[in-house]
Image (spheres, rainbow, N blue to C red):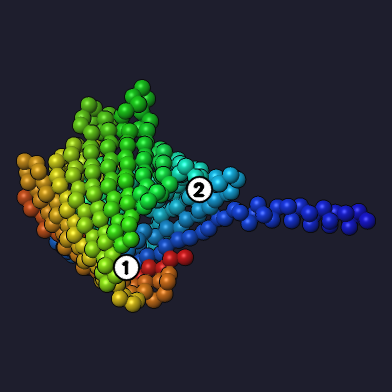
């Protein structure tokens, strides 16, 4: 009899817990991307390498949610980057260097806290036919060339609900400097609008450069407007950016590619322009982009990048890819052709690779 009661109690507990378990979800996902890359035009000559994260950064991630009732959910995401060619961790050895956050999602929007992408960077990615990857990566000249590097630590982010195709993003990050609440702090925002085949987005970022070595210096301020229009047979991409202040435009091949520089490496006043195309046909897709950096400073260190790419989908989760890119540096500018996670060594590069997502 006791055994029968225990079995009945266990069955009731399992039944009671089933709905709650059904409302919760945890997903494990990832990307493994490898490519053969040849770089040229650098001071050391040609470099040929088998490397990871060319089309997209190799990663493993965990995301999930819990239904709290009343239309509110708790959400989290933990994403770790790695080098598939060596097994080393990415993002300078950080355990969850790509992203890690926790927050609440409901009818009034979503609030998350942790290490997260900046709205300015996501605006740049939207405009880039290469999606901030491959050797045609816009980060070679745009997104990383500014104070709005791709991620912010110590970030509080709010994303509004979408109304009539419009939503708003707001971010703030503390510099966490003792006795100085403004030192190193960051603020950003984006306004996003979608209507049928058209998507428009404006992104802005402001970073206080006050550090031990940059006391009382100018803030870095970056603004960008981007547009994508899907004609069906092709997508047209365009963006225009304005960068002002110390560290508002820095060369990607510095000693700290995942942070901002302690001394200015390029212009403190520049304009950016991007034009691009994506042409999908069946399992194939062609990509092309032109990017121009207009240095408004005294040195006039302009640069232009032209890139071509090709993707072939073997399945929904596996693709082959190839790309070529070249940068024309002027008056001592030193922009280099990199990829999704590497800065590169010269002014031109070719890659061919494979990517699998799970």
Q: Quadrant of residue 194?
A: bottom left
Q: Is disc 2 placed on a helix, strand or loop? A: strand
Q: Secondary structure at mark 1?
A: strand
Residue wearing tag 2:
76
Determine the residue located farthest toward the top in the rendered image: 179
Residue at image point 36% right, 22% down? 179
- Image position of 330 with respect to 312: above or below: above
Mark sitting on residue 16:
none
Horizontal and vertical percent position of residue 71: 55, 46
Say whether disc 2 or disc 1 marks the residue closer to the N-terminus.
Answer: 1
Q: Around disc 2, counting alpha carbons within 10 Å, would you say few (fewer than 14), some (14 to 19), or many (20 or more)?
A: some
Look at mark 1 in the image and give the residue it sits on.
Answer: 35
Residue 128 appears left or right of 291:
right
* Relative height, residue 77 to residue 297 (above, below): below
Q: Quadrant of the N terminus?
A: bottom right
Tag 1: Cα neighbours inside 10 Å, few (<14), some, or many (≥20)? many
> Cα distance, mark 2 to mark 1?
31 Å
Image point 19% across, 51% down: which residue?
A: 240
- Quarter of the rendering containing residue 275: bottom left
Q: In this view of the protein, which residue sits in the foreground, 204 or 330?
A: 204
In the depicted structure, whether residue 154 falls above or below residue 119:
above
Q: Nearer the viewer, residue 190 or 295?
A: 190
x and y percentages locating residue 343 in the rendered image: 25, 55
The residue shown at (58%, 49%) is 66
């Amino acid at each position: 009899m006791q055994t029968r009661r225990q079995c009945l109690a266990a069955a009731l507990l399992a039944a009671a817990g089933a709905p709650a378990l059904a409302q919760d979800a945890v997903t494990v996902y990832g990307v493994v991307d490898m490519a053969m890359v040849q770089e040229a035009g650098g001071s050391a000559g040609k470099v040929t390498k088998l490397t990871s994260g060319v089309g997209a950064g190799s990663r493993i991630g965990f995301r999930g949610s819990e239904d709290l009732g009343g239309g509110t959910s708790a959400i989290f995401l933990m994403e770790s980057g790695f080098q598939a060619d060596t097994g080393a961790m990415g993002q300078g050895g950080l355990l969850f260097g790509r992203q890690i956050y926790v927050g609440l999602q409901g009818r009034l929007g979503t609030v998350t806290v942790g290490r997260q992408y900046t709205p300015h960077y996501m605006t740049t990615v939207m405009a880039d036919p290469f999606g901030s990857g491959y050797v045609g990566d816009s980060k070679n000249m745009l997104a990383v060339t500014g104070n709005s590097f791709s991620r912010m630590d110590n970030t509080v982010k709010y994303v509004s609900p979408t109304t009539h195709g419009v939503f708003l993003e707001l971010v703030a990050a503390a510099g966490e400097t003792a006795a100085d609440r403004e030192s190193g702090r960051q603020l950003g925002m984006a306004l996003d609008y979608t209507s049928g085949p058209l998507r428009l987005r404006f992104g802005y970022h402001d970073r206080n450069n006050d550090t031990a070595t940059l006391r009382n210096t100018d803030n870095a301020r970056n603004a960008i407007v981007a547009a994508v229009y899907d004609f069906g047979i092709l997508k047209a991409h365009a963006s225009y950016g304005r960068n002002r202040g110390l560290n508002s435009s820095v060369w990607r091949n510095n000693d700290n590619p995942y942070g901002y520089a302690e001394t200015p490496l390029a212009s403190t006043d520049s304009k950016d322009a991007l034009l691009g195309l994506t042409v999908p046909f069946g399992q194939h897709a062609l990509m092309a982009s032109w990017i121009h950096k207009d240095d408004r400073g005294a040195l006039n260190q302009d640069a232009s990048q032209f890139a071509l790419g090709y993707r072939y989908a073997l399945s929904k989760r596996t693709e082959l890819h190839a790309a070529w890119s070249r940068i024309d540096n002027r008056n001592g500018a030193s922009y280099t052709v990199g990829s999704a996670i590497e800065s590169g060594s010269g002014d031109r590069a070719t890659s061919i690779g494979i990517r699998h997502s799970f």
